[in-house]
Amino acid sequence: MSVTIATNIRLPEDLLKALKCRAIEEKKSVNQIIRETIEMSLTHVPQSEVREKDSFEDVIGIARSGIKDASSKYDRCYL
């Protein structure tokens, strides 16, 4: 088990009241509620960061020929 370290935080009065009410409702300490909330926040990936794959990404690079200087030599080959 990891070592716990005491720290201080400043909360608005209404937030502290809500926190204490939640602790009473869940029959937990304020410290436990804060720890659990921080742990969930740090392990949860917000939906805005989960990016769906764009179907257009499959098309990118599909027509690569491997010829790096084709456009610069076009005039010499086809004109």
Image (tube, rainbow, N blue to C red):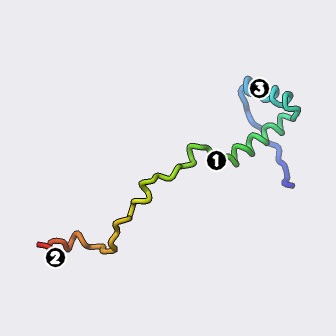
Residue 55, image x, y percentages: 45, 53
Q: Mark 1 points at which residue?
A: 45
Q: Nearer the viewer, residue 4 or 53?
A: 53
> Residue at 86% across / 28% down in the picture?
24
Task: Decide if residue 61 is on the left or right side of residue 5.
Answer: left
> Residue at 84% across / 54% down in the picture?
2
Near mark 1 (Cα within 10 A), the count class, few <14, some 14-19 or many ≥20, is: few
Task: Name which of mark 3 and mark 1 comes first in the sequence.
Answer: 3
Dot 2: element: helix
Q: Nearer the viewer, mark 2 or mark 3?
A: 2
Q: Name the residue under label 2.
A: 77
Q: Which of 8 and 44 is in front in this view?
A: 44
Residue 4, image x, y percentages: 84, 49
Q: Are marks 2 and 1 in contact (CB under 8 Å)?
A: no
Distance of label 2 from label 3 (alpha carbons): 76 Å
Q: Is residue 34 above or below residue 3?
A: above
- Residue 22 numbered tag: none
Q: What residue type is labelled 2?
A: Cys
Distance of label 2 from label 1 (alpha carbons): 54 Å
Task: Name which of mark 2 and mark 1 comes first in the sequence.
Answer: 1
Q: What residue type is labelled 1?
A: Val
Residue 11, image x, y percentages: 73, 30
> Residue at 73% across / 27% down in the picture?
15
Q: Is residue 1 above or below residue 7?
A: below
Q: Name the residue under label 3.
A: 18
Dot 1: element: loop
Q: Which amino acid does label 3 sit on?
A: Ala
Dot 3: element: helix
